[in-house]
Amino acid sequence: MPRALFGEVTRAGFLDGRTATALFVLGVARIAAIAVAWFGAYNRWRWGYFAGVAVMVIDLAYQAIVGVSGLGGWLTTALIGLASLGALVLLVGASMDDFAIVKVRFAVQADPRLKSADAYFRKGVRYKDVGMWALAVANFREAVGRAPQQVEYLRWLGYGYMRIARPERALTVLQEAKRLAPDRPELDELISLVQDMLAEEKRRTQEHLIEPLWVDPVVDRDV
């Protein structure tokens, strides 16, 4: 039993004083490293979590070496190894929620530092050029609010609403632009595209809402 618990160190003359001291220091250092790593993991520090996992994996390898070399008893090594492996699994499992991806919609607003309609429009164009349509729409909207008669502002605001899947708003804006500039053929093209989007959206909605109506010929028969 002593050998199963403590390995070959129980045999007389197996270790000299210097080796025993070195093993004792390594044991204390091992406990300290695990404690620090687990403290970091408990506080959900990014480096602490990965340090905790790394330390536990290294410690499992260390225990395997100790068990094979006879520096530790096979029973003690097996029990501690199973406990460490279970703790590692619990650590990873308990932390999965911290690594979950949550989709969040952010509210956007125009740049409050700008003053003029043209400045807001140019800012919207810059956002549009890099594909950031939500921010582009926010700035186009501010530009239209300051210069509601500018057809170009209305055109880009309507197109922006199309890009962020707001066809109802896009149609309203583009119709206003068409009222102000009836000779602009590109506005007709955009309005036609928006109307197609609305028709497709209506069709999909009806497909989801309409379900087959099953009629029992006996129950619903006229009597």
Image (cartoon, rainbow, N blue to C red):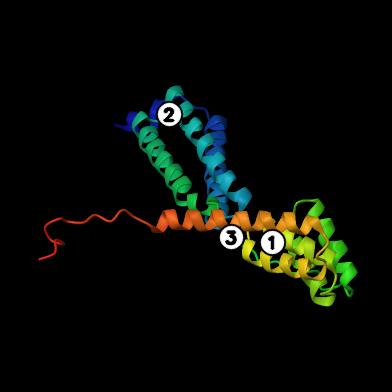
Q: Is residue 65 left or right of residue 161?
A: left
| Label 1 secondary element | helix
In this view, the mark in front (2 or 3): 3
> At x 42% / y 47%, what residue is drawn?
90
Q: Where's the C terminus, which quadrant?
A: bottom left
| Circle on res. 104 | 3
Q: Amino acid at mark 2?
A: Val
Q: Is residue 97 left or right of residue 40?
A: left
Pointer 3 local density, CA inside 10 Å: few below 14, some 14–19, many at least 20: few
Which is nearer the N-term, disc 2 or disc 1? Answer: 2
Q: Amino acid at mark 1?
A: Tyr
> At x 82% / y 71%, what residue is drawn?
143
> At x 41% / y 25%, what residue is drawn?
8
> At x 80% / y 72%, what residue is drawn?
144
| Label 2 sits on residue | 9
In contact (CB < 8 Å): disc 2 and disc 1:
no
| Circle on res. 161 | 1
Q: Amino acid at mark 3?
A: Val
Q: Is residue 101 above or below residue 8?
A: below
